[in-house]
Image (tube, rainbow, N blue to C red):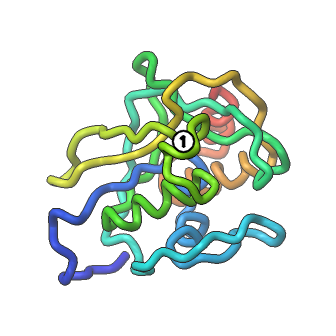
Amino acid sequence: MTNSPNTPREDLVWYLSYGSNMLFERFMHYIRGGSFRKGGACHEPCADRSEPRRKACYRIPYDMYYAKSSSNWGGKAVSFLDTSHEGEALGVAYLVTRQQFDHVVIQENNGLPPELNPGWYDKTLSLGLLDGYEVLTFTNAEKLPPNDPSEEYLETLAAGLRENYTEMTEEEIREYLRSR
């Protein structure tokens, strides 16, 4: 994580990931550009390629579930939040600039802002403040029909959980991912 004193405090937000971007290496491909894995999507770099200022584990008050089918993950499902009722999901928050957050949203929406690509991540969600900065994430505005994720996607989520939730056992990680 970096300490960039030149960024105004009001320009910083927490980007809260609950899917594959929980893994720092994967998230940084959205910031620096390039592909996470051989044959994966190539992401456009962000104008601001600096690392997040900080990172924190964050429990989300909604359930995470798998839906849609992504060509980046073998035509299988990716993560969304069910905001129709309370629940709990594990996430990782990165303190980034608002420009970096907006860039990630567009990249996750196949290069389009949410309002031009409804049906994927078309809802930005504010979850309050953490250390004085707004916590933002994105999901679909409606609960989507569930679908199964690929093993590769689940392993990326597991790697993100291992990296950040070091107190979790392998069995707890597998059970968490299975229960979604």
Q: Which residue appears at 45% of the width and 37% of the height?
A: 123
State left or right for residue 121 relative to residue 177.
left
Percent coordinates x, y for residue 78 in the rendering: 67, 41
Question: Quadrant of the image for the N terminus?
Answer: bottom left
Q: Which residue appears at 54% of the width and 41% of the height?
A: 121
Q: Nearer the viewer, residue 177 or 70?
A: 70
Tell me, yes or no, if residue 166 can be seen here.
no
Q: Is residue 126 above or below residue 109?
A: above
State left or right for residue 15 relative to residue 37.
left
- Based on the displayed image, in which of its 4 quarters is residue 64 positioned? top right
Q: Nearer the viewer, residue 113 or 95?
A: 113
> Which residue bears the numbered disc 1?
121
Q: Is residue 1 above or below residue 68?
A: below
Q: Which residue appears at 71% of the width and 35% of the height?
A: 68
Q: Which residue appears at 23% of the width and 40% of the height?
A: 128
Residue type, mark 1 in image: Tyr
